[in-house]
Image (cartoon, helix red, strand yellow):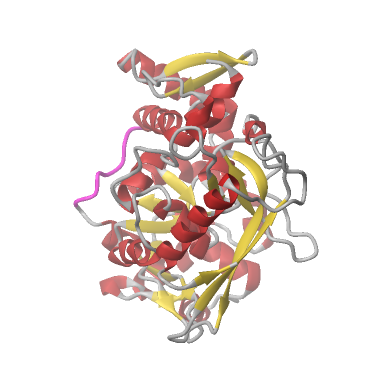
């Protein structure tokens, strides 16, 4: 495999190209976990890997508890399927607690405090009760905690990592924004979930699921994504290959060892585009797994992402045939009303490629304009509301 094949192969592995997932649940199962700190955009990350799932489809799966949103892998939000959460939480919890140790000390969350807050929260959400963040804070205050700011954030995170809390059904505010609720981990995951795995088996499962859904990728990419050590990932790969020599395929690209799904056909460069050689534009959120799924090999994206906003500029990523070509964001006109509309702020920073001879800052025309129109239409269908740009 040569370097030119990395982008189209990753697009296919991540189901940003056909064959896409049958449902948002299947998209999540393929990716194992999806970074989800920006809930509205994270819904899109799942839906755009399907043949037409909507924002409501994702929200319903979260409300039903099929898709759960919690702190896992790294100290940030992720979507995880209910069937995978028990073993993935068990595997990542020690590393997460280790990563948070400094903040636990600064916020006074010692083992005794954690046990006391965990017991209070478990009682508060028992019997199917689901609480907003404000209600969680009130319960902790009744238990004697100064549940504000970082103290509240890390008490909640500790409870998530420890298997006490997990996401409940999202609720909408009067303005139409979606808010997280918290529920009982044991009740939401349920007795019919797959359950925990022995650590070595979990490492092998993690390696296989990661490299099959994001390959070609490196051991360092997987370690940084998962929060595990490189030694853990090497062990997971070795165990997976020992159990099944065809579990993963190895390729050397630019002198570096990459792993990917077995039997992966190297797509032609054109397959990164839309139906053959026509260009394709994708609007992906800045925390999409196509970006955050990699660290040392993220450069194949062709730019620097994620980025911090500068002077109010959008930070989500416009892709042209899998490579960075600009930035975007959404905004809403008359939010929470029957006449609500979405406005897309799309800024092409170019160049968009040799086909049209576009330069930095130019707006696309011809075939590229058609590609952008299709991308906007897909987002409009996902939201289920009129969209302008």
Q: Nearer the viewer, residue 245 or 157?
A: 245
- The secondary structure that most of the magenta stretch takes on is loop
Residue 195 part of the magenta-drawn span: yes
Horizontal relation, residue 311 to residue 79: left or right = right
Residue extending farthest to the front is 366
Residue extending farthest to the left is 192
Q: Which residues are magenta?
A: 192-198
Residue under the image location 46 percent in, 20 percent down: 266
Q: Is residue 37 visible?
A: yes
Q: Residue 311, position in %: x, y? A: 80, 64
Q: Residue 50, position in %: x, y? A: 36, 49
Horizontal relation, residue 314 to residue 208: left or right = right
**Eyeballing the image, is 257 above or below 180?**
above
Q: Residue 197, position in %: x, y? A: 31, 36
Q: Is residue 218 visible?
A: no
Horizontal relation, residue 312 to residue 329: left or right = right
Q: Residue 127, position in %: x, y? A: 26, 73
**Eyeballing the image, is 135 above or below 209?**
below
Total count of labels: 0
Quadrant in which the C terminus is drawn: bottom right
Residue under the image location 41 percent in, 41 percent down: 31
Q: Quadrant of residue 14?
A: top left
Q: Nearer the viewer, residue 78 or 45?
A: 45
Residue under the image location 41 percent in, 77 percent down: 171
Residue 378 part of the magenta-drawn span: no
Q: Nearer the viewer, residue 280 or 28?
A: 280
């Amino acid at each position: 495999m040569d370097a030119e094949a990395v982008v189209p192969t990753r697009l296919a592995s991540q189901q940003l190209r056909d064959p896409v997932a049958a449902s948002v649940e299947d998209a999540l199962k393929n990716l194992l976990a999806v970074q989800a700190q920006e809930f509205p955009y994270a819904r899109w990350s799942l839906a755009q890997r399907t043949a037409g799932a909507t924002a409501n489809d994702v929200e319903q799966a979260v409300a039903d508890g099929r898709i759960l949103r919690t702190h896992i892998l790294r100290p940030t939000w992720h979507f995880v399927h209910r069937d995978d959460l028990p073993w993935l939480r068990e595997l990542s919890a020690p590393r997460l607690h280790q990563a948070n140790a400094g903040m636990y000390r600064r916020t006074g969350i010692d083992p005794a405090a954690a046990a006391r807050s965990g017991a209070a929260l478990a009682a508060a959400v028992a019997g199917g009760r689901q609480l907003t963040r404000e209600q969680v804070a009130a319960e902790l205050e009744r238990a004697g905690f100064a549940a504000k700011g970082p103290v509240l954030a890390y008490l909640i995170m500790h409870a998530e990592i420890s298997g006490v809390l997990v996401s409940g059904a999202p609720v909408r505010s009067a303005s139409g924004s979606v808010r997280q609720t918290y529920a009982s981990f044991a009740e939401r995951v349920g007795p019919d979930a797959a359950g925990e795995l022995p650590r070595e088996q979990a490492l092998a499962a993690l390696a296989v699921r990661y490299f099959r859904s994001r390959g070609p990728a490196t051991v360092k990419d997987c370690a940084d994504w998962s929060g595990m050590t490189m030694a853990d990932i090497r062990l997971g790969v070795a165990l997976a290959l020992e159990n099944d020599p065809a579990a993963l395929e190895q390729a050397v690209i630019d002198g570096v060892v990459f792993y990917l799904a077995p039997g992966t056909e190297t797509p032609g460069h054109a397959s990164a585009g839309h139906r053959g050689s026509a260009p394709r534009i994708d609007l992906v959120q800045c925390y999409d797994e196509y970006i955050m799924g990699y660290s040392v090999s993220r450069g194949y994206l062709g730019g620097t992402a994620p980025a911090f906003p500068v002077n109010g500029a959008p930070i989500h990523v416009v892709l042209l045939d899998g490579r960075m070509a600009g930035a975007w964001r959404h905004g809403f006109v008359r939010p929470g009303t029957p006449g609500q509309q979405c406005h897309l702020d799309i800024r092409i920073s170019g160049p968009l490629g040799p086909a049209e001879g576009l330069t930095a800052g130019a707006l696309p025309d011809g075939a590229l304009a058609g590609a952008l129109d299709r991308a906007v239409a897909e987002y409009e269908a996902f939201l289920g509301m009129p969209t302008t740009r």
